[in-house]
Image (tube, rainbow, N blue to C red):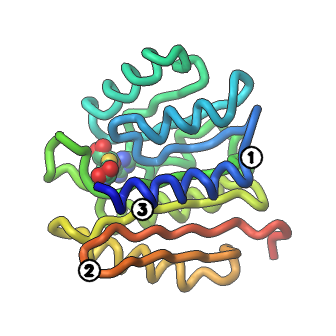
Amino acid sequence: MADGRRLTDLAHQQVAAVAGTGDEVVDATAGNGQDTLELARLVGETGRVHAFDIQQAAIDQTRRRLTRYGLMERVTLQLCGHEHLLERLPPESRGNIAAVMFNLGYLPGGDKKRITRAATTLRGMEQAIQCLRPGGVLTVIAYPGHPGGSEELDAVKHWFQHQPRVLDAVRIVEPGGNAPVFLSARRPSSQP
Ligand code: SAH
């Protein structure tokens, strides 16, 4: 959908503003692997992408896509929920991640019941903030149009709006209606 595509581009712009060659980044919802692919290109041969998804189909699609482009060596796939981000990342990655991207909802073309849910999404975002390096970026695209989507969006928006101590530069782009919503923030450069 056109709106979703525009917001995905926005997310990648935000990430590319702070992350680049040799960096470590996270795709918290691998889905069909499109974001993982763009992240793998961004971090180059010396960088690393950690990509999470709870569905084998998503992990398989992502592996196929990255393999097709010869970039799988830069990627670690985790068949695991992003609410386990902290325990799944190597200890040395904690505090060293340049960007974490969430693209919520269901896998396009997949099982529409296997969606991201507010409780685990919030836990994932909490952990994402702890993994980010100072100045690192968190981006989220949320979809109010499917069952459960608007509740999840409300929870995510509330979270972004009530983290003044740990988030800087909060940005929310909300076109309205059922259109997808973009949210981003930075981990402050100097932590309180
Ligand atoms: N809605 C987007 C695509 C989102 S894909 C679009 O239309 O382009 C979202 C992915 O998140 C799915 O593949 C789903 O399996 C995954 N997911 C659901 N819960 C998750 C969790 N707790 N941790 C990681 N991934 C999860």
Q: Position of residue 56 (x, y in %)?
A: 27, 30
> Is residue 112 visible in this depiction of the protein?
yes
User: Mark 3 is on which residue type?
Assistant: Ile
Q: Residue at x 59, y 39 (%)?
A: 89
Q: Residue at x 38, y 77 (%)?
A: 175
* Residue identifier under label 1: 96
Q: Position of residue 32 (x, y in %)?
A: 34, 36
* Residue identifier under label 3: 141
Label 2, ligand 1: CB separation under 8 Å: no
Residues packed near mark 2 inside 10 Å, few (<14), some (14 to 19) or many (20 plus): few
Q: Residue at x 14, y 44 (%)?
A: 111
Label 3, ligand 1: CB separation under 8 Å: yes
In the displayed structure, does residue 66 sit left or right of residue 31?
Answer: right
* Residue identifier under label 2: 177
User: Mark 1 is on which residue type?
Assistant: Asn
Mark in front: 2 vs 1: 2
User: Mark 2 is on which residue type?
Assistant: Gly
